Image (cartoon, grey):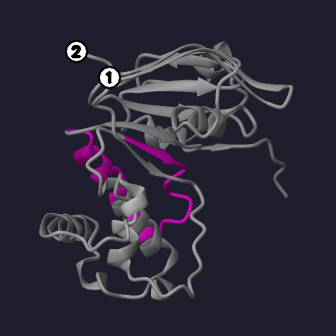
């Protein structure tokens, strides 16, 4: 099985500030990798390197010729007053980005309909983007990430702007998508993703790969990952910064 993506001893920096050092990561078809780590640890930098938005200062990156990436960023900046519909936003994610404005063909229109049905937004196809809620907007951008039929879907904190109704279904949808594509999911919510992902990588200046979805505070400490797994009863719930109770 040919890997989709492989990073070997990759380092990255901004000016002279090294953010990532000697990162090794292998992504195979249908992998589902959860990326965790503290703020400032390099998670976003890792994504930028994978997405060719930042050139590494060392190491090698090998990508399969068949690799197609769909990307759902953490923050989607779009002018809600811009006269563009839900369908048009989704179509803007087509891989030939210079020609996204061209009239879509029948196959692409069918694909948009299928994606909107998938995220329960079939009735909003022709709605102006400015009329959507934050959660609806995030669903539209998920469809945009999927319009090009990627075999690697990258999501950066996908539940940041998701409404509670969709959040309850989001990870189910990702489970369905994982049957036909690899997924790389960045999240602070270790308790939730550990029940979904297949493997976990902690990014904090380097990358420590954990070939399982079972993770404990002891594992985090051994990886020098300064976050804490909080449990309510027997169910791991959320990663929190150190805080004081009033």
Label ID, residue 208: none
Q: Residue at x 60, y 32 (%)?
A: 46
Q: Residues within 10 Å of mark 1 (few under 14, many from 20)?
A: some
Residue range in magenta is 153-179
Counting from the top left corner in percent of width and height, residue 115 is at 24, 64
Q: Name the image quarter holding residue 19.
A: top right
Q: Residue at x 31, y 86 (%)?
A: 126
Label ID, residue 1: 2
Which residue, given by chain and number where applicable, does mark 1 sit on? Answer: 28
Q: 236 or 185: which is nearer to us? A: 185
Q: Is residue 195 left or right of residue 120?
A: right
Please, what secondary structure does the residue beneath circle 2 have?
loop
Answer whether labels 2 and 1 touch (C-beta < 8 Å).
yes
Q: Is residue 197 left or right of residue 237?
A: left
Kindly tell me whether residue 168 is visible in this rendering: no
Q: Is residue 119 magenta?
A: no
């Amino acid at each position: 099985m040919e890997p989709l993506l492989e990073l070997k001893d990759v380092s990255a920096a901004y000016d002279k500030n090294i953010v990532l050092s000697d990162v090794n990561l292998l992504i195979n078809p249908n992998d589902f990798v959860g990326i965790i780590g503290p703020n400032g640890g390099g998670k976003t930098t890792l994504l930028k390197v994978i997405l060719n938005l930042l050139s590494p200062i060392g190491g090698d990156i090998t990508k399969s010729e068949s690799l197609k990436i769909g990307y759902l960023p953490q923050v989607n900046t779009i002018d809600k007053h811009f006269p563009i519909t839900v369908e048009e936003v989704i179509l803007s994610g087509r891989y030939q980005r210079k020609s996204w404005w061209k009239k879509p063909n029948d196959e692409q229109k069918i694909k948009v309909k299928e994606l909107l049905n998938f995220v329960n937004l079939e009735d909003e196809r022709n709605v102006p983007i400015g009329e959507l809620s934050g959660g609806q907007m995030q669903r539209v951008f998920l469809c945009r990430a999927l319009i090009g039929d990627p075999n690697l879907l990258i999501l950066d904190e996908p539940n940041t702007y998701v409404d509670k109704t969709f959040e309850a279904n989001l990870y189910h949808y990702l489970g369905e998508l994982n049957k036909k594509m690899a997924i790389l999911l960045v999240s602070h919510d270790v308790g939730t993703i550990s029940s979904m992902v297949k493997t976990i990588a902690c990014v904090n200046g380097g990358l420590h790969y954990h070939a399982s979805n079972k993770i404990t505070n002891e594992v985090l400490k051994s990886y020098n990952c300064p976050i804490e797994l909080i449990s309510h009863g027997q169910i791991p719930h959320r990663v929190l910064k150190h805080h004081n109770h009033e």
